[in-house]
Amino acid sequence: MLPAPLKSALFALHRSQIYEPRNRRVAEGVAQRIGRAASLLDVGCGDGNTAQRVAEMVGATDVQGVEVQIRPEQLIPIKEFDGNTLPFPDASFDAVMIADVLHHADNQAQLLKECVRVARNCVVVKDHFSFGPVSHQMLKWLDEAGNAAASVPVRARYFTMPEFVEMVTGAGAKVAALEWPFIIHSPPWRWIMPSELQFMARLEPTKA
C-alpha cells in the first residue's frame, strides 16, 4: 500500500503528463472525424470534460453524456444508464462519441449497436486493439493505472481488429474512416504505451 502523499503525487503526475494531453488529443481526433454537428452524445463521459471540448470544436449546442456511475462533478448534462441501453430515441444526436469505454462494457456488441441507433450521422470510437497475450496484459496494466484515480473497475475486454469490424457490421454500421495507430501520448510515455495499441474510427449507420 503506497503512502498517501506518494499516491497523491503519482496521481498528480499522471494527470499532468498523461491524462490531460490524452484528453486533448482524443478531443481533437474526435472533432476532426465528426466535422460539424449541432448535437453530441458522449457514452461513458466521465465528468464530461472531453465532450465539452469536442462540442466547442464541432459547434454542438446540445451536448449530453451518459455514465454508469455519475460523478459529483459534471461539466455537461449527464444521465445514468445501465451500460447496455441508451435512454434516448432513435437518431437523437448528430454524432455519438465513445472513447476508451467499449472495452469496459458487459456486452460490447449491444452497446455499440445502441450508439449507432441513437446517431443520425456518425459514431466516433476511440479504443484499443489487442494482438495477443503480451499486448493484452500491457493494456490491462495501463488501464489499471489510468483508472485508479476514478476507481473505475478494469475488465480488460480488449478485442482484435477483425472482432471490431464484426461488431460494427452487426451494429448496422460501416467503418468510414480508421486511424491506426492513433498517436495519443508524447515521448517518453509513447515508448511505454505504444501507439499501435490505439485506434480511432468513424462509423456511419448503414440501415435506414
Image (cartoon, grey):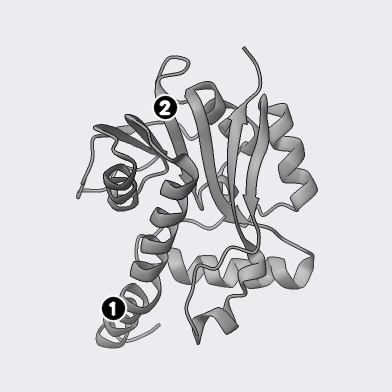
Can the viewer see residue 132?
yes
Residue at 38% over, 36% down: 36
63 or 73, which is in the foreground?
63
144 or 197, which is in the foreground?
197
Residue 90 image position (x, y, % from top left): 47, 15
Give me the disc on residue 62: none
- Kind of residue sitting beneath label 2: Asp
Q: How far apart are marks 2 and 1 (CA)?
A: 35 Å
- Kind of residue sitting beneath label 1: Ala
Residue at 67% over, 39% down: 175
Task: Please tell me which of labels 2 and 1 falls first in the chain.
Answer: 1
Residue 193 image position (x, y, % from top left): 58, 76
State the residue position of label 1. Answer: 12
The C terminus lies in which quarter of the figure? top right
State the residue position of label 2. Answer: 94
In the shown orientation, is residue 163 left or right of residue 75? right
Residue 23 image position (x, y, % from top left): 38, 61
Can the viewer see residue 84?
no
In the rendered image of this protein, does residue 161 appear above or below residue 139? above
116 or 136, which is in the foreground?
116
Residue at 34% over, 47% down: 54
